[in-house]
């Protein structure tokens, strides 16, 4: 995928993409996540059965609210 920006820290393995002004979309692209071994960082449900070309949208909204929502949706070991 050629859009978005990889996130760091607690949100490693996810990407963000601005939608409009202060709105941001946070998502995970399974192929990219697996290529960087980020599936070892957070345990996505059904990761083993999910096709590589899957994009899962975790949050959309104002910048700070979207990041907060995304942090609640990922599961850390």
Image: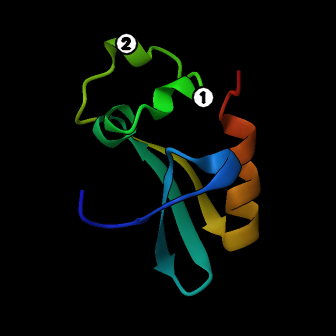
x%, y% of residue 7?
55, 58
Quadrant (top left, top right, bottom left, bottom right) of the N terminus: bottom left
Quadrant (top left, top right, bottom left, bottom right) of the C terminus: top right
For this rendering, which residue is in front, 6 or 70? 6
Quarter location, residue 75: top right
Quarter location, residue 58: top right
x%, y% of residue 72?
75, 40
Q: In what element is the residue under mark 2?
A: helix
Of the image marks 1 and 2, the number of the one nearer the N terminus: 1
Residue drawn where x is 69% and y is 58% of the image: 67
Relative height, residue 59 to residue 55 (above, below): below
Horizontal side of residue 68 vs 24, given as left or right: right
For this rendering, which residue is in front, 52 or 23? 52
Q: Which residue is mark 2?
A: 48
Relative height, residue 8 to residue 72 (above, below): below
x%, y% of residue 13?
50, 44
Q: Which residue is mark 1?
A: 42
Q: Residues within 10 Å of mark 2 (few under 14, many from 20)?
A: few
Residue drawn where x is 59% and y is 30% of the image: 41
Distance CA(mark 1)–CA(mark 2) = 13 Å
Horizontal side of residue 2 vs 23, given as left or right: left
């Amino acid at each position: 995928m050629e859009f978005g920006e990889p996130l760091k820290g607690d949100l490693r393995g996810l990407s963000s993409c601005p939608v409009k002004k202060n709105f941001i979309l946070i998502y995970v692209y399974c192929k990219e996540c697996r290529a960087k071994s980020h599936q070892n960082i957070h345990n996505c449900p059904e990761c083993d059965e999910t096709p590589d070309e899957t994009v899962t949208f975790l949050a959309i909204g104002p910048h700070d609210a979207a990041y907060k929502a995304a942090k609640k949706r990922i599961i850390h070991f």
